Image (tube, helix red, strand yellow):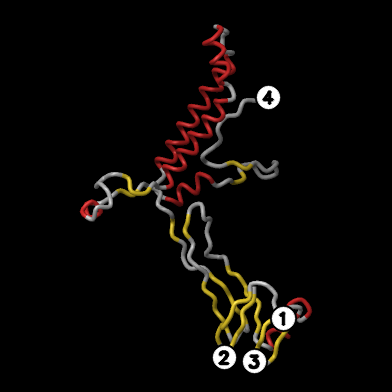
Amino acid sequence: MYALITDGSISKYINHPKSLVIGDVQYPAKIFSLWSLSELNAIGIYEVTFDNSNKKDEQWYINTNQTFTYDASAGTVTATYGSATAKAHADTLFTAQDETDGLGTEGEVKTRGLKYHLIQTIKKQAAGILQDTDWYITRKADAGTAVPSSITTHRAAVRTKAAAQETQITNAADTPALETLYTYVNTADEGDPVVMERPLGELPRLES
């Protein structure tokens, strides 16, 4: 991405190479591949440098729009983000004023927070894992064939772990705490192979 500088400020953004007119001169698109940066700078075209230091994971945060800044002394154009806003971790409820305004009933859920959606995902994941062994339960009901103890143990472990994960999510104090639960880190001792784990853990899978 490039920016065209006119009279000391950004006048146009160039998202991809194209022909353009600067002053009374028309330049072909190939200048972007054939010319050096200094040659482009000489006619007012600067490559944009993207500073993502303030950009955060959009699963957990709402990032600002980028701000483009031209620094004449440095001869640079930089795109930066402002401070990201954490997404709401808890449900937002309708207020008394909302009810007065006819928007909803006070105390009822207005917008679901991250915790609700994360817990629903865990429920679906657990149900999907259990579905793989549901046929044992159906066979027992239909034909009286005993369910292997390994299957019973596995299904109980899935339910137990899912419940524990839901509790971890429910008890998280804020959005950064939720993000930490899902962040994988190397838990191996120094010198050992890399072992990436997250505080939330994983739902048990049946060994094949």
**Disc 1 residue type?**
Leu
Q: Position of residue 58 (x, y in %)?
A: 52, 55
**Disc 3 residue type?**
Gly
Q: Between disc 1 and disc 2, whose residue precedes?
A: 2
Taking 132 as reference, is 86 above or below it?
below
Tag of residue 208? 4
For the residues labelled 4 and 1, say whether their Cβ atoms are less than 8 Å apart: no
Tell whether 155 sits left or right of 92.
right
Question: Helix or strand or loop: what does disc 3 sit on?
Answer: loop
Q: Toward which corner of the image does residue 197 lie, by quadrant?
A: top right
Disc 1: which residue: 37
| Residue located farthest toward the top when viewing the structure as drawn | 144
Report crowding for label 2: few under 14, some 14 to 19, many 20 or more residues within 10 A (C-alpha). few
> How far is mark 1 from mark 2, CA to CA?
19 Å
Question: Helix or strand or loop: what does disc 2 sit on?
Answer: loop
3 vs 1, front mark: 3
Residue at 56% across, 9% down: 146
Disc 2: which residue: 7
> How far is mark 2 from mark 4, CA to CA?
68 Å
2 vs 4, front mark: 2
Q: For this rendering, which residue is in front, 86 or 93? A: 93
Q: For this rendering, which residue is in front, 85 or 174? A: 85
Tell whether 108 sits left or right of 132.
left
1 vs 2, front mark: 2
Tell whether 199 sits left or right of 75.
left
> How far is mark 3 from mark 1, CA to CA?
19 Å
Taking 112 as reference, is 138 above or below it?
above
Question: Helix or strand or loop: what does disc 1 sit on?
Answer: helix
| Residue located farthest toward the right when viewing the structure as drawn | 34
Disc 3: which residue: 23
Tag of residue 70? none
Q: Position of residue 106 (x, y in %)?
A: 24, 47
